[in-house]
Image (cartoon, helix red, strand yellow):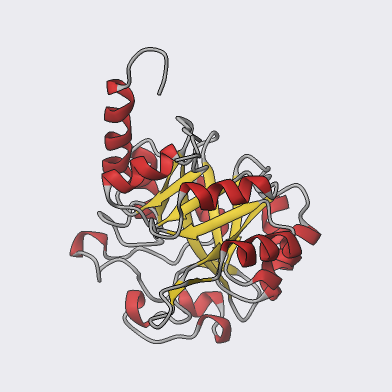
Amino acid sequence: MKSQHHNSQTRIIGHRGASYDAPENTLAAFELAWQQAEDGVEGDFHVTRDGCIVCIHDYDTQRTGGQRLVIADSHLSELQLLEYGSWKAAQFAGQPIPRVADIVAGMPEEKLLVMELKTCPEIVAPLLQEIQSHGLTKNRVLLIAFDKRTIAECTRQMTAVAAHWLTAYKRDTGTGHWSPTVDEVIQTIQSCGADGLGTENRTEVVTPQYIDSLHNAGIDQFHVWTVDDAEQAKYYRELGAWGITTNRPAFIRSALSDTLRKLPTGGV
């Protein structure tokens, strides 16, 4: 095992907030993540018809709002008529669809907001206005997206804000090979100007050799999603993950803290 990238500073990021315990992408889930002393929260963002940025995963409101409104075709005022919490539990009834301002208002100073941009590049211009108006500096926000055009536009318009390109993996049932390959990942990151990689949790793909290849290409940051297993979290921390995104932030934090307490004096 060539790579020894142990990083005790690996950030624990609440996936859609503390979404194991609270309804995803709601202020309740984000507040719970802060209470659990996490380093940051990740949320999903779309643009409304009237140019507002809202936090919701799907392209419509059916699953979490109980009624189907397409985000891109709806005004903010229409989306605000629904509630987004009771699908999880009755105690969360009445949760509104969060705007960026709502999330930032409850965000502790030293914490991080990871914004997954679920749309094409049209989100970037209104997002730039939001980031500037709320004073979200580089150490308080990370932009992530699967769409490399969106990341390229982020890096062009917002040079002071970090961005990671996201990828999942598919396995060819005939050859057993995974795609994209690490070389293809490196090429995409370099072509869109991303600061790092956001990788799917695939331990069979994200190996020490994979991380060495990234480092050799000058890509020093990677985060991984979604990790709810303690042993997998320890594995990625040993690889030097910049961050671990999890539905269970308190559980993963506890697991990694226990490991740190057990380490002998002098490090790993």
Q: Position of residue 57 (x, y in %)?
A: 44, 70
Q: Nearer the viewer, residue 92 or 77?
A: 92
Q: Position of residue 103 (x, y in %)?
A: 50, 52
The C terminus: image quadrant? top left
Look at the picture and state if 211 lies above or below 51.
above
Q: Position of residue 238 (x, y in %)?
A: 42, 37
Question: Residue, x 80% and y 60% (percent of image)?
Answer: 156
Report whether 185 appears left or right of 7: right
Place residue 226 in its image quadrant: bottom left
Exactly how many numbered labels are in the figure?
0
Report whether 81 appears left or right of 92: right
Q: Nearer the viewer, residue 197 or 31?
A: 197
Question: Residue, x 70% and y 72% (percent of image)?
Answer: 149
Is residue 221 among the parts visible in the rendering? yes
Is residue 104 among the parts visible in the rendering? no
Q: Nearer the viewer, residue 160 or 132?
A: 160
